[in-house]
Amino acid sequence: MNCFNENCKKNDIFTKMMLCKGCYKSYYCSRLCQKEHWKNEHRHVCKMHKKECEKKYQIKLISSNNNGLFATKTIYRAEKIISEKSILTGQSEADILSKYMKLNQQNKTIFDNLHNQFPEINRIHGIFKTHAIPLGENSNIGGIFPIISRCNHSCKANAISLWDNIDKVEKLFAIKKINPNEEIRVNYNKDYLNNTQQRIAQLQQQFNFICNCECCTQNDEQSNKNLDYMQSIHSGIVTGMPNKPEQTLLQIYDLLKLIKFEFPNNDHIYYVSCYDLFQNYIYLQDKKNAHKWLYNAYICSKIYLGENDDFVKKNTKYLSIERIHTHPTYRFTQYSQGYKG
Ligand SMILES: [Zn+2]
Ligand SMILES: [Zn+2]
Ligand SMILES: [Zn+2]
C-alpha cells in the first residue's frame, strides 16, 4: 500500500492506513503524512472529488488509424476521469449484429468511427472485439463506451476502468498523477501477474496487436523473475492458508512487497492481497491483524468503487474489531477448522 503523500519516507507494508474523511479518496500511513499531503496538494483536490467537474481529456490522433485519450489538465491519483453509459452491449456475434442494426444514427456513427483490429472478420464484430470492455471483471458481456473504449493499452497503465453495477456505467479513474498532455492508458491484460512473454502472447491472441509499451520493450529480467515468483505464491495461497498458515502469511507479505514495487499505487491490485492477509490472520486466530487487513482492503476498494459497491458494502459492517468474528469468512474458517480436528 502506498501512502498518498508522495514524499512519504515510510516504506513498510504493515501499516494500517487512515482514510481522508473529507473525500474517502486518499489514505495515509500517519497524521503527519496526511497534513503534508493536504498542504502540498490535497486541499485543492479533496472537494473536487465530490463534484463532477469539467472535461479532463481530449481524443487525439496518434497515427493514421489510431486515436488516444490525452489529459488536458493534471489528474490526481484516484480521481474519476469520466463515467459513461454503453452504446451497445452484447455477448454473441448474432446478438451484437442485431443490436448494431437498432442503433440510432448518432451512436451508429460513433461505432463506425472506431478502429477495427480484426480486418479478416465481419467489420461490426471486429470493431466490437477491438473495443468492447467486459461489464465487470468476470462478465462475459461486453460493452462499447464512446470515450473509454478509445483508451489505449499499457502494461504500466496510469488509469483503470471499472464497471459500476449499481449505476450501470463504466468509470475511468487515474491510478497515479497524470500530467497535462500525457496519454491516458489502461491495462487490457486482466492477469496482472503475467510476465512479459505471457502478456505479449495474451494481448496478441485477444486483441491482435504486439504490445510495445515501455514495459514490454524493456523486457526487464528482474521484473519477470519477480512476476514468476509472485505467480507461484499466488497459486499456493488457497491451499497454503488452511494447511500452513504461518508460512503462507510470510509469502503473502512477500507478494504484497513485490506488488508495491512492480505496481506502485495500484490499489485495485493491493486490495486482493490485503484481503488474503485478512483471511490468513483468521486462520491464525489473530483478530487484531485480521481486522487491520480487512480495513486496508476496504479502503483500497472504496476509493475506486465507492460506498455502493457490493464488496465495500459487505465489509462496512465488520469495521469494528468487536464485530469481526461475525464476518462470514471468519465463521466459515472456524467451522472448517473445527472439522479438520
Ligand atoms: Zn506516509
Ligand atoms: Zn480528501
Ligand atoms: Zn506491454
Image (cartoon, grey):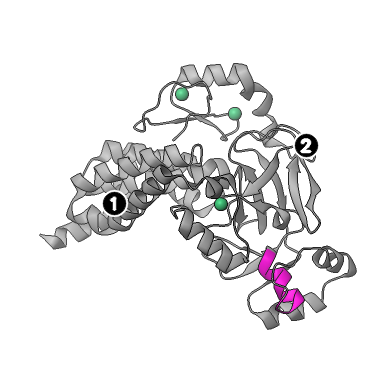
Check disc 1 and give the amino acid type.
Tyr
Q: Main secondary structure of the magenta part?
A: helix
Residue 92 rendering spot, x and y as whole percentages? 64, 79
Judged left or right of residue 171, residue 32 is left
Quadrant location, the N terminus: top left
Residue at image position (70%, 79%) is: 121
Label 2 CB sits under 8 Å from any ligand 2 atom: no
Identified at 43% across, 26% down, the residue is 29
> Residue 168 placed where, x, y %?
66, 59
Residue of label 2: 72
Q: Quadrant of residue 120?
A: bottom right
Q: Indicate whether residue 125 is drawn in magenta.
A: yes
Badge 2 marks a residue whose secondary structure is loop
- Report x, y in % for residue 325: 29, 46
The type of residue carrying mark 2 is Thr
Q: Position of residue 282 (x, y in %)?
A: 26, 47
Alpha-carbon span between mark 1 and mark 2:
47 Å
Q: Is residue 152 visible?
A: yes
Region rendered in magenta = 120-130
**Label at residue 330:** 1
* Quarter that holds the C terminus: bottom left
Quadrant of res 141: bottom right
Q: Is residue 333 magenta?
A: no
- Residue mark closest to the camera, 1 vs 2: 2
Q: Which residue is pictured at 74% across the width and 33% down the height? A: 180
Q: Which of 10 and 321 is in front in this view?
A: 10
* Farthest-out residue, left: 341
Q: In this view, does 255 lie to the left or right of 316?
A: left
Q: Name the side, left or right, on which 230 lies relative to 109.
A: left
Residue 284: in sight, yes or no? no
Compared with 221, 210 (above or below) is: below
